[in-house]
Image (cartoon, rainbow, N blue to C red):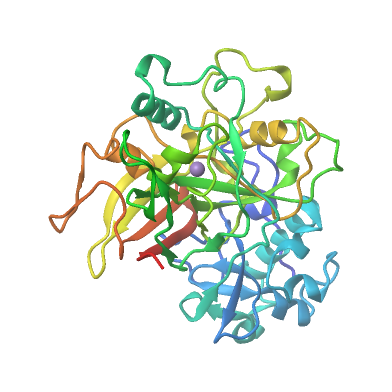
Amino acid sequence: MNGWKLIPYFHNKIQKHMLNIEANNPNLKSWVEVTSNSDFPIQNLPFGVFSINEEYPRVGVAIGDKILDLKAIFELGYLSGLPFTAADFDSEYLNSMMMQGKEGTRALRDRVSELLNAQNTELQGDAEKVLFNQSDAQMHLPVMVGDYTDFYSSEQHAYNVGCMFRDPDNALLPNWKHIPVGYHGRASSIIPSGQPIHRPKGQQKPSETEPPVFGPCKLLDFELEMAFITYEGKELGDSIYTTEADDYIFGMTLFNDWSARDIQKWEYVPLGPFLAKNFASSTSCWVVTLDALEPFRVPGPVQDPKVLPYLEYSGDKHIAIDLEVLIQPENGEENSVCHSNYKHMYWNMNQQLAHHTSNGCDIHAGDMLASGTISGGEEGQYGSMLEISWKGTKPYKMNDGTERKFIQDSDTVIMRGYAQKDDLRIGFGEVSSKVLPTK
Ligand code: MN
């Protein structure tokens, strides 16, 4: 440790219930250069899977505009004493590393924080062997997703959709404030940021009086969401309670739940979304740990009517994360179409996970559970084109003079997000995907 000592940081600015996570000390500085608007200061240290020059993918941690190669630092002996093996980092997914649970990955993040600390010189001599430019790297899907669930937990989004398809007086269905409503999605079509999608084809019913047709989706939409990635859960038959849910959540990503509205409208009765959703969902590639997000906890909304006991929770379990959606036409400028915030959720992750396992359903390392579209209470904060264009009745005016009701071929949809408090910014990077014509 070269005499480097941890600086005590439990001063009165930190809320009492906040976990004592060494790596979150806002005073820490890294010897790796980090600009003030970087998403990846030393207090973040998100995990991902990267490759350089199409070589083997391996596990890394983002710091500033660099990537720290965990496979390399393991081989050089810097992670001795931790419960990991070489195979955990010489891997195309984070799942193996995540099998060490919260205790293991927290110790790992603490150790990486020590190694990157400006006051610690032990790794600096090997910097050239272990640090790579993010601009030279290809990022991969961070986890092998075993199961994917999508919730529907933003009240404003559920209300907006209810207003459009039913009426404002009955916008929320009777179960909505009692159950974190969700559906089982499809893991096979979750893709990393940067991978384009093809406009899906499917069955639609554009006319009330004519039979259905099959063809390219005409109402292609994004959904601004965040996903959380779980550790290995309990045995089948056991439940995870709201009080322990944090221990089963590894981290979060930005998530674009692509949606084909015309296909959805015709197919969703009575069993819910199917082919309108499972053609692709895009995720950002850096997994920001729940630990790194602890300083940004905020209270959630008052839940009225009172929820059933298994959904009650204590403490601040929501998280304030600024979110933005941009549409970039081919060779054009980015158009910012939505500013929202993850704090707008009605149901938090603890409640979602408790509900998901309340019947004994098991979860595994690498499962992804997405929030549902995150819409705020005002125009400009809506997290889908369905809401932004109000079902196509209010086209969005782009910088280049064109209009968007939904997403067109060659548009790139970009989502960015970060949490900020004083000078500390913990970001996610982005999830960006271009829409190609139907195959
Ligand atoms: Mn969704």
Q: In the image, what residue occupies the spot 28% across and 34% down?
A: 379
Q: Is residue 223 left or right of residue 250?
A: left
> In which quadrant of the rendered image does the N terminus lie?
bottom right
Q: Which of the pair 21/417 is nearer the observer?
A: 417
Residue closer to the observer: 385 or 120: 385
Q: Residue furthest left?
A: 401
Q: Is residue 415 visible?
A: yes
Q: Residue 323 at what x, y percent from top left?
A: 41, 46
Residue at screen point 77% across, 70% down: 88
- The image position of residue 239, as x and y in percent, is 80, 34
Residue 372 versus residue 159 in the image, above or below = below
* Residue at screen point 74% across, 58% down: 105
Q: Nearer the viewer, residue 183 or 200?
A: 200
Residue 262 lies left or right of residue 25; in this view the side is left
The one nearer the camera, 256 or 77, is: 256
Q: Residue at x 48, y 44 (%)?
A: 321
Q: Position of residue 340 (x, y in %)?
A: 39, 40
Residue 373 in view (yes/no): no
* Numbered disc total: 0
Answer with left or right where residue 172 lies relative to residue 9: left
Quarter holding residue 262 = top left
Q: Quadrant of the C terminus?
A: bottom left
Residue 94 against residue 394 in the figure, above or below? below
User: In the image, residue 222 lies at what x, y percent?
Assistant: 40, 49
